[in-house]
């Protein structure tokens, strides 16, 4: 009896699509987990854990994302420079007012693998605060994540 070889993804047999996700009124964590799965390629039958099979995702209206419970008042973003006293803490409300794209980016990238492969997947993510994006030439499909 002849054994069948296991199929594995290669750059030549991967087809990437572009999707647009409207984040208006969506809960941040639920949005992030679904977008991270698309960036990884877990929504495809050709998913290969050690290879980037994911699609491109454009997130619009990042400034209209919501949090549940008291997180809007309590959530903080921390950055550390590596120097003594170099911890910077930013409240969620300040971050939403100044850099709404970073809120969504941080949530999604935090759900990707923390290695070279994850960094390559993160490059396929585009986040915009408003409803406009400059990727009409890629003919992105609207994706309804509810």
Image (spheres, helix red, strand yellow):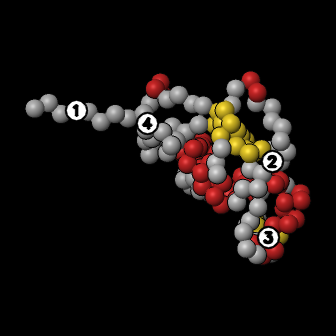
Label 1 environment density (alpha carbons within 10 Å; few <14, some 14–19, many ≥20): few
Front disc: 4 or 2: 2
Report helix, strand or loop for mark 4: loop
Q: Closest to the observer: 20 or 36?
A: 20
Q: Which residue has dot 1 on it?
A: 4
Are the residues tagged 2 and 1 within 8 Å (C-beta)? no
> Earlier along the polypeptide chain: callout 2 or callout 3?
2
Would you say residue 134 is visible in this rendering? yes
Quarter holding residue 93 = bottom right
Report helix, strand or loop for mark 2: loop
Mark 4 → mark 2, Cα distance in angstroms: 30 Å
Mark 1 → mark 4, Cα distance in angstroms: 17 Å
Quarter holding residue 47 = top left
Mark 2 → mark 1, Cα distance in angstroms: 47 Å
> Earlier along the polypeptide chain: callout 2 or callout 1?
1
Q: Residue at x 26, y 33 (%)?
A: 5
Q: Which residue has dot 4 on it?
A: 46
Q: Relative to residue 106, is residue 1 depicted above or below?
A: above
Q: Closest to the observer: 122 or 101?
A: 101
Q: Which residue has dot 3 on it?
A: 72
């Amino acid at each position: 009896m002849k054994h069948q070889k296991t199929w594995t993804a290669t750059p030549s047999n991967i087809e990437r699509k572009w999707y647009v996700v409207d984040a208006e009124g969506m809960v941040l964590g639920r949005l992030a987990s679904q977008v991270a799965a698309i960036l990884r390629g877990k929504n495809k039958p050709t998913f290969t854990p050690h290879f980037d099979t994911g699609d491109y995702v454009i997130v619009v209206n990042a400034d209209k994302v919501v949090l549940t419970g008291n997180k809007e008042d309590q959530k903080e973003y921390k950055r550390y420079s590596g120097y003594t006293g170099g911890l910077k803490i930013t409240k969620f409300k300040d971050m939403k007012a100044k850099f709404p794209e970073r809120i969504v980016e941080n949530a999604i990238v935090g759900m990707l693998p923390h290695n070279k492969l994850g960094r390559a997947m993160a490059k396929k993510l585009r986040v915009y605060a408003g409803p406009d994006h400059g990727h009409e030439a890629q003919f992105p499909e609207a994706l309804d994540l509810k």
